[in-house]
Image: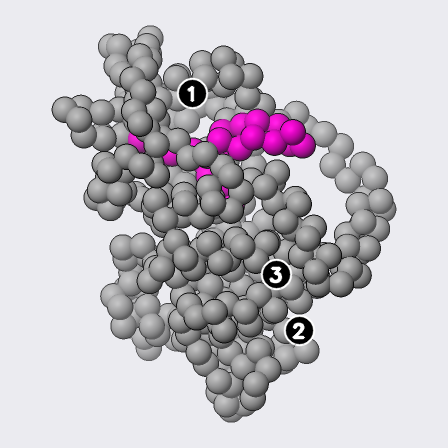
Amino acid sequence: MTRQLTSHNRDATSMNVCELDPLTDDRWPDFVAQHPASSVFHTRAWLTVLSSSYGYKPVAFATVRSGKIINAVVFCEVKSWFTGNRLVSLPFSDHCQPLAYDLDLAAILNHLERRRIMRRLKYVELRPSTCYGIDLKRGALDISRRFSLQKIDLRPDLDTLYSGFHSSCIRRKIKRAEREELIYESGRSSSLLLRFRELLLLTRRRHKLPPQPASWFQNIVRSLGDSVTIHLLSKDTVPVASIMTFTHKKVLTYKYGCSNAHFSNLGGTPLLFWKVIQQAKETAMEDLDLGRSDFDDPGLIKFKENLGAASSELVYFRNPVPEQKLALRKPEKRDWARQAMTQLPDPLFAGVGRLLYRHLG
């Protein structure tokens, strides 16, 4: 379904902004496939995961000429009695670059501002991978959050990539893991997904965070198909570490990682990333996107940099910008609740995630 809407920009001539359903509009897959700035998070498959898992409604605002999509910004409508109704581009996605520029982007942003007011939305949020070449402040958006983004350039040969690893933090651990003769598996079978999920529950308990619902990962495997791979290392028959990656064109995206802390000294996680990089080279991938990291988690940032990743700033924009509140107003109560959550048995612990995540996108 396409709805034609007129957007007036005081700096440009009047132009039309169309509202598209990327799940049903046959032009969307071709537009994403051909756009140089698109990522796996723009694809119909990923939008289907968001919709089928949490009930979000994907919507793209686009400029169209001669029936062809020229520029577009894709969102999900998040409706929640708990956290408010809003447009987010995109929930549970590290970044989602606006596929729009110049006057077309300005028209889309101006339309979004009117839509926010008319629909009484709590806010509109964009999560670009880079601000280069786009001006988001023209749409009354302003900076709301900052993160660190790490990427590895995969174009050098394997020897060069390996030499770029930190000698003691990565290379030494890889050699240790190889001596341990850890068993490596990759694919998207139900058995691999089950063992990945078991490690994820352990990791989320360790971090005192609710786990994503099992249905979320089942929908990822079902929707992304050949684009998703689960990588797993085991010691004998015991899962040690696992990561999940996505592919889109020449970019490999690391999305989720988990491990068993009892085996952390075996070097499983560094070896997994080395296995992933080797496979990426075999399939002519050019970039490994390691995703966002919070600035208050310097250990994670350093680990990624030790893999040879380059860091850049990832900036989110929102309209209206959230008011600065006294975060950690009662940290002792929040910490108590998180600690209590980790003591729940697996079914109840997983249930917390099922209840919360649809409100958090």
At 42% from the left and 35% from the top, the residue drawn is 58
Q: 198 above or below 146?
A: below
Which mark is nearer the camera, 3 or 1?
Answer: 1
Mark 2: secondary structure:
helix
Q: How many marks?
A: 3
Of the numbered discs 2 and 1, the one sitting upstream in the chain is: 1
Q: Position of residue 344 (x, y in %)?
A: 78, 60
Of the numbered discs 2 and 3, the one sitting upstream in the chain is: 2
Comparing 220 with 339, the one in front is 220
**In screen coordinates, is 80 left or right of 31?**
right
Q: Position of residue 310 (x, y in %)?
A: 43, 57
Q: Which residue is mark 3?
A: 299
Q: CA distance from mark 2 to mark 3?
A: 16 Å
Q: What residue type is disc 3 on?
A: Gly
- The magenta span reads 72-92
**In screen coordinates, is 275 left or right of 182?**
left
Q: Residues within 10 Å of mark 2 (few under 14, many from 20)?
A: some
Contact, mark 2 vs mark 3 (Cβ under 8 Å):
no
Contact, mark 2 vs mark 1 (Cβ under 8 Å):
no
Q: 89 above or below 226?
A: above
At 66% from the left and 45% from the top, the residue drawn is 355
Q: Residues within 10 Å of mark 1 (few under 14, many from 20)?
A: many
Q: Which residue is mark 2?
A: 261
At 57% from the left and 85% from the top, the residue drawn is 237
Q: Which residue is mark 1?
A: 112
In terms of image quadrants, where is residue 298?
Answer: bottom right
Is residue 234 visible to the viewer in this orientation of the structure?
A: yes
* Quadrant where the C terminus is found in the figure: top right
**In screen coordinates, is 63 left or right of 210?**
left
Comparing 147 with 26, the one in front is 26
Q: CA distance from mark 3 to mark 1?
A: 38 Å
Can residue 74 be found in the magenta stretch? yes
